[in-house]
Image: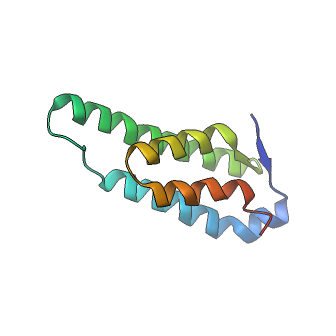
Amino acid sequence: MTGTPIAPDDRARLDQVFMQVVLDVQAQAQQTAPAQAGNLAAMFHKETVSDALQGCAMLIAGWNQGRVDDAGLTRTVKALKALDLNELAARVEKLRQIAEG
């Protein structure tokens, strides 16, 4: 259970921003398609999308406990990069500093 702590006031103020990023990740990850045809590519794609969604669940759970979950953030970013959603991965990485801005 590690992560960047978020003060309750910051969490309340930033909740909408945080959740919008997470919802974007969930929607965009689910809209991707395998990079290649075939069962193996489909299996790896499904696994990668699942990793992104599990990372989001970890981020939400951490957020509800007042932190940006490091493991969830890392898992989500890695999956998004594998899905070639690099801009979205960069947005997720910025969540680590969400309370600093």
Image vertical order of residue 88 relative to residue 83, above or below = below
Q: What residue occupies the far left of the structure in this picture? A: 38
Quadrant for the N terminus in the image = top right
Please tell me which residue is depicted at 63% across the width and 68% down the height of the picture. 17
User: x%, y% of residue 87?
Assistant: 48, 61
User: x%, y% of residue 5?
Assistant: 81, 50
Q: What residue occupies the far top of the structure in this picture? A: 40
In the image, taking residue 84 as reference, residue 20 lies left or right, namely: right
User: x%, y% of residue 33?
Assistant: 25, 49
Q: How many marks?
A: 0
Please tell me which residue is depicted at 69% across the width and 51% down the height of the picture. 63
Residue 39: quarter of image: top left
Q: How is the image coloured?
A: rainbow
In the image, taking residue 24 as reference, residue 84 lies left or right, namely: left
In the image, taking residue 59 as reference, residue 33 lies left or right, namely: left
In the image, taking residue 30 as reference, residue 55 lies left or right, namely: right
Please tell me which residue is depicted at 55% across the width and 66% down the height of the picture. 20
Quadrant for the C terminus in the image = bottom right
Nearer to us in this view, 46 or 41? 41
Please tell me which residue is depicted at 36% across the width and 34% down the height of the picture. 47
